[in-house]
Amino acid sequence: MSIISDWMREHRITEVECITPDFTGIARGKIIPKEKFSEEEGMRLPQVVLAQTVTGEYADNIIPNTDPDMILLPDPNSLRLVPWAKDPVAQLIHDCFHFDGSPVEIAPRYVLKRVLALYDEMGWEPVVAPEMEFYLVAVNRDPDLPLQPPVGRTGRPETGRKAYSIDAVNEYDDLFEDVYDYCDIQNLQIDTLIHEIGACQMEINFLHGEPLELADQVFLFKRTVREAAIRRNMYATFMAKPMENEPGSAMHIHMSIKNKATGENVFSNADGQANAHFYHAIGGMQKYLPQAIALFAPFVNSYRRLTRYWAAPINVQWGYDNRSCGIRIPHSTPAARRIENRLPGVDSNPYLALAATLACAYLGIKEQLSPSEPLTTDAYGLPSVFPHDLDEAVSNLRRCEAIKAVLGEQFVEAFCAVKEAEYIEYKRVISPWERKHLLLHV
């Protein structure tokens, strides 16, 4: 018997959710009765399901016109219970393959594996720790209406700014008890819970670990928090900028690199000082983050977050414990020396955000790029270096041959095509602002 079969028998599983993340980070797949589940045969899905727009449409010329299938095989390490299911239900994240056994190159999980293989060739293993910001909002059934904070245990919605307030978090104790219980059942290694700057904006951090495992955990965590909120008659949203007068939500990524042979931090010398690899990684992020921004800010809404003085970066300056910079170096011991990428929005696909972060650092190390001098002042006063919309960001990504070489040209072209299709669809929409201010005044 296999590990999966033994586990399912032990937990008396009745159904299996066979899932894989698409470009957006949505769980695609099938729900299969346990008796019909086959670990060896896997399941089949059309390849095109990976490359849907967020509205469910398809871009042209990504997949052959014959609309071929792919084979999805389960990763035993991803086996978990679905904690909110009435009956014992398992969830398994699957990898995507062609019928000849080769990987489907546009699959987000494979893109991250591809980058990790480059580090493995150097005898290194990246270590990451994501920080997840999100908003709790009242149930909103009309997308034309602005979002509002939900009612807490006192019977009143949150007002004003409550950054780091313990009492403000306690307003939603029942919800967070559910979240922690659900995460414990799924072995999602979450750590600190804080109230962020915005009205009912929360942050939950993850313990540091191996990138693929952390990407899986973030993928499942977003689903978990949304499910827990719905059961408490509210919504949890991972939009980058859900409210016009509140800060946006980020997925800050802390990264370091471990030498696989010695276990030591690749960024630190024996004497504890930062070494060339550390500075080259920063140099690579400074050069390539603006080119790869579509992977960190993947939707039209994402660019509303990247605004001066709104707790989000507008450039790739770096500094020690400087949160106004796009690249922050937290205070740490030499063994824990790490780089924080503050660019990704929480709306980004965790597999792709991690892959792109590691790709930029890798390119800096390979090209031996030198960073600018660390900034000790406010980076918000300096010019913005990022595109102002998705259309320009996609053009940047498509032109960057170095990023294509690391992430895979087929993936980058497919991702860009999907984002172009989303942007075209968005541009057809007439917003409430336009009707309000232009209808009778121009």
Image (cartoon, helix red, strand yellow):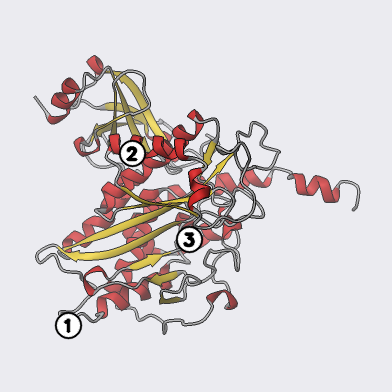
Residue 293 numbered mark, or none? 3
Residue at position x 36%, y 71% in the image: 330
Residue 252: quadrant of the picture:
bottom left
Which tag is nearer the camera, tag 1 or tag 3? 1
Q: Is residue 250 visible?
A: yes
Element class at badge 3: helix
Three-letter residue code for mark 1: Asp
Residue 292 lies, in percent from the top left, at 44, 61
Closer to the camera, 196 or 285? 196
- Relative to 227, 184 lies left or right: left
Closer to the camera, 352 or 304? 304
Closer to the camera, 349 or 88? 88
Residue 370: quadrant of the picture:
bottom left
Closer to the camera, 94 or 88? 88
Residue 279 lies, in percent from the top left, at 31, 78
Of the numbered discs 2 and 3, the one sitting upstream in the chain is 2
Mark-to-mark CA distance, 1 and 3: 35 Å
Element class at badge 2: helix
Mark-to-mark CA distance, 2 and 3: 30 Å
Residue corresponding to mark 1: 271
Q: In the rendered image of this protein, does residue 197 appear above or below residue 105?
A: below
Residue at position x 60%, y 62% in the image: 388
Q: In the rendered image of this protein, does residue 1 appear above or below residue 25?
A: above
